[in-house]
Image (tube, rainbow, N blue to C red):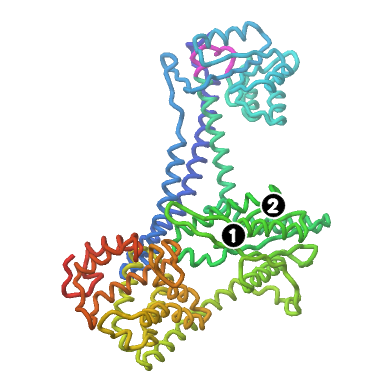
Amino acid sequence: MGTDKPNPTSDQDQAVIEGERLKILLQMAGATAHELNQPLVELMGYIDLFAFDRDDPVKMDSHLDKIKAAGHRIAKIVQKIQAIRPDQAEPAGSDVKIVSFDRPIDLLIIEDLDSDYERIVAALAGEERIHISRARTFEEALGKLAENTFHLMILDYLLPWGNGLAFLTDLERMRIDIPVIFSTGHGDEMVAAQAIQLGAYDYLPKSHLDRPNLLRVIAHTLEKHRLRAEVNQAMEKMAEMSVRDDLTGLFNRRYMNESLEREFSRARRYDNDLSCLLIDMDFFKQINDAYGHIFGDAVLKQFAGLMKAKVRESDLCFRYGGEEFLVLLPNTDIEGAQNTGEKLRSATEAYLFRDGENQIHTTISVGCVSLRLHQPPDVRSMLALADKALYRAKAEGRNRLIVYMETPGDMFQGEKQDVDMAFVRERMTAILEKSKKASLNALALLLDQLGAARFKAHNHQSLAQIDWMGGRLHLSGAMIETIKRAAMLHDRLKILIPESVIGKNGPLNAEEWACIENHATVLAEVAGLFEFFRDERDILLHHQERYDGTGYPNGLKGEEIPLGARILAIADAVTAMMSERPYRPPLTGRQIVKELRQNAGTQFDPRIVDIFLDALAENPAAALSHADMPV
């Protein structure tokens, strides 16, 4: 059999195989490096920003969140790298190893000569994991492949009914993916090269059909097949990642643009209808501000799952950006789009979004357009109409679906359709913030002139408490500023309470208590004069609610009370306890802690009290600007 002599053809074939194997490993390494590059760059960038903004707690919290997110992404990629490893090998002779699998290896041998078939069977004797089947013809082999699953095939080059090269071509044409070891009595290198080019994994002359060579070639072939399968899976995953939004799993905006162009052109070509729903989650910024971005992300993911459950398989769901989504409905008229949009709107309204600690109900606004009804000249115009319909849905009160209705100002006129609504909204928001700040300053000045200046010291201390608690709760800067604006209005509008009530040295009578209890409603009414103080109004209206539900004006309980109101209640109470009153001196730090503990769970949110007290124990001076602060 000549097994003791070196065979140059075998060495060359082995070199070819090892080259292919190295190529696959390099492809895998390149994909991994590409995946790691972006989060690593982000991580290093945010670390630099973290050091630069060390004196700005709000920015540091934001940078820290992004550093954590990049770290999580890197950790997931590392897990994927660890999963890409060679299978464990076990000895199968003096210097031969075979890949170890939990399941058996089903081997199909296509060989017409009994002598050659029996040589292979004898060489593999004792390998209980290898189950051998035989086919004498290509037709018989195809029948067995159709009926059974095989992990490997040894294919003879010359059979009475054709050659193995043609059979390899047939396997490729029929998309039958099975690793093939090519065998021939001819030592022609050209035949071996042709077989490998046509898809064979390895080549073995019949003179080398002995146990060591067979086990070595089987091991290499199975490993190479596994590596190729993993590379294909990785490439498919990368292709999917390029069109999917990381957070929600929906198609991303880039793929949305491609799909819109494709479906728009197809609908016009075949005279079909095409509809789309542009969706915005109502008051989503308040969800992020009140509960944090982690819970906000959970809401977006759960809403994405709700979307996919309420549309057809042929419909396409996209994350348009932020809290905006788009559903593309091919072959759907405006009535069908309305039905789908209403199903999704009502399902969202009824759904309880939750994670381990938080839960909320929220709503969506929907803009609806169709190609046949609205006749937009191009995709961009179609999106512009959907955006206008969505804007009207929000302007009319949210939690509704609006079909675009044309007005004289909405006609397509030259470049007017190119107005970027997102840019307009962004600029209007900036103007509104400036208007809010200017209005608040003017109102504060007016109230100070009316006598509210005497409450400034109390207000400054309350603002410090809110800043301190907001930082400990990792609230956004916008949320903290909203609570501070509410606190400013709360303190300065105390001038609306009669001095006889504020400065009374003794218990209040029923009429005086009614005045105090009505103050929250009065505050809300004043804030309600300014539409952009809507968030502050909710805080002021409910800051006298109690955590156990016995407060006023609405008897809200626990998490029903807005977070800002729960924080303001503690800040105002702590500041009041630190202040001198006609009927008592300022409380000590120890007394303040005792009051908070006694009222946690009844008057105050116990979670916020615990956070306050834990931080107070670490650094009393950071929270209480009091000379006597034993805790």
For badge 2, the amino acid type reads: Asp
Q: Which residue in the rendered view is the most extreme toward the right?
A: 271
User: Which callout, 2 or 1, points at the residue further toward the start of the chain?
Assistant: 2
Q: Which residues are magenta?
A: 204-215
Above or below 54: residue 34: above
For badge 1, the amino acid type reads: Glu
Tell me the distance, in whole angstroms, between the alpha carbons under discs 2 and 1: 22 Å
Give how far across and how far down residue 301 sits, in percent: 53, 53
Nearest the camera: 69 or 387? Answer: 387
Give how far across and how far down residue 546 sits, in percent: 38, 67
Give how far across and how far down residue 66 sits, in percent: 42, 59
The quarter of the picture where residue 402 lies is bottom right
Q: Are marks 2 and 1 in contact (CB under 8 Å)?
A: no
By secondary structure, the bulk of the magenta-drawn segment is best described as helix
Q: Secondary structure at mark 1?
A: helix
Nearest the camera: 505 or 342? Answer: 505
| Mark 1, other Cα within 10 Å: few <14 / some 14–19 / many ≥20 | few
Residue that badge 1 annotates: 349
Residue that badge 2 annotates: 315
Nearest the camera: 290 or 347? Answer: 347
Would residue 209 be counted in the magenta stretch? yes
The structure residue drawn at horizontal position 19% and vertical position 72%, both measured from the top left corner, is 588
The quarter of the picture where residue 610 lies is bottom left
Residue 305 appears left or right of 515: right
The structure residue drawn at horizontal position 28% and vertical position 84%, both measured from the top left corner, is 504
Residue 397 appears left or right of 525: right
Residue 546 appears left or right of 175: left
The structure residue drawn at horizontal position 27% and vertical position 63%, both measured from the top left corner, is 598
* Rendered-image quadrant of the C terminus: bottom left
Above or below 135: residue 464: below
Residue 412 shows in this picture: no
